[in-house]
Amino acid sequence: MAAETGTAEPRAWPAPAGARYDQLARVPAHRWWRPLLGTVVVALGWLLGMIVVLLAATVLAVSVGVPATPEGERWFADPLWEVATNLLSIAAVIPVVFLAARLVQRRRPGTVSSVVGHLRWRWLLRCLLVAIPMMVVSLVLLAVLATVLDGEAAPAEPTGGWVGWPRFGLSAAVLVVTVPLQAAAEEYLARGWFIQAFGAWFRTPWPGIVAGGLVFVVLHSISQVWGAADLMLYAVVLGWLTVRTGGLEAGIALHAVGNLMVFLITAAAGLLGIDGSAGDAPWYLFLANLVILPLYAWIIAGMHRRTRQERVVPARPAAA
């Protein structure tokens, strides 16, 4: 039909006007199998990306004299080098998600970012201005809850000491670059790809929110039920907020700020590289987030409404 009318089918379809964030994969080229194939491409492409990052980091480490110890528990002797490599390995999923959206689903990659087809940087900045104080309050609340617990309820933590300004300055410079990329990558995968993949099949966004949440939980090292519950709460609240605000900006802001604060504190205490993850969280972290996360979502949703940010794909001019 396209050949008969003289109009060629586009290689990448724009998002349909009026569509919610979770519906952005419903382009004319959509077929039921495209989300499945795209997920396989994302998984294999991410694995390849992690291998490339590890090889590049190893070559660079050898060139600058950082010892590599593949036979030990960690790949690099320097914990900062190890952490940076791990964070960039996670970040490697971002271009893979874009490629899967473009090549498999035949839609514009920017639609994974938001309903306007790209990351809304001003809106992201506004979300950061809310996320920073919220995460400070969260850390204070967490410290208070940990303090009032008795010795049996509070988990034992590795002790550390101030590493000094030269080492902390180097660590902070590396972490400020790599942690936001890692946090954004997890949002693009769990809240971006999976919400939109399931949104191509279902009218409601909740199957995608739950599926992305389960993936988010599985990708973290889970040692107790409270850690899994906290991660799932995190995923559900940010998943709802992603659909409500029409993009990943609010989730990226909170995720990046929270992770960066934790990594900076860890670096200051000389504890980078110590085994542990969000899946090891104690029950009182879940209790703190039960207050902080809904409060953040409420503030962001209200600010989104007042600033009249796009919630669905805006209509295009008639001339277009």
Image (cartoon, grey):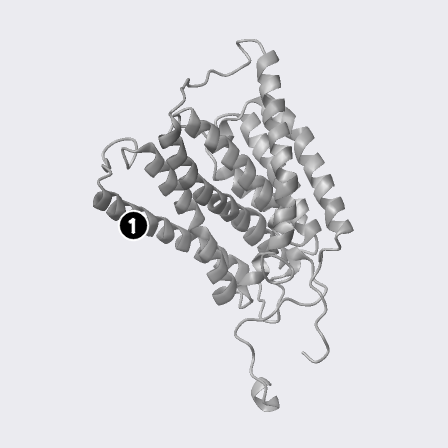
| Residue type at the position of mark 1 | Ala
Give the side of residue 163 with respect to residue 259, left or right. Answer: left
Secondary element type, mark 1: helix
Q: Is residue 33 visible?
A: no
Q: Is residue 193 above or below residue 108?
A: above
The spot of residue 73 in percent (x, y) is 29, 31
**Along the line of sight, the residue nearer the viewer: 36 or 104:** 104
Mark 1: few/some/many CA within 10 Å (<14, 14-19, 20+) = few
Quadrant placement of the N terminus = bottom right
Q: Is residue 138 visible?
A: yes
- What residue do we see at 70% from left, 67% from top? 17
The spot of residue 35 in percent (x, y) is 54, 59
**Along the line of sight, the residue nearer the viewer: 179 or 37:** 179
Q: How many marks?
A: 1
| Residue underneath mark 1 | 56
Give the side of residue 49 with respect to residue 203, left or right. Answer: left
- What residue do we see at 65% from left, 55% from top? 22
Q: Is residue 54 above or below residue 277?
A: below
The spot of residue 82 in percent (x, y) is 34, 37
Quadrant placement of the C terminus = bottom right
Residue 61 in which image quadrant: top left
Pick out the residue farthest to the right.
306
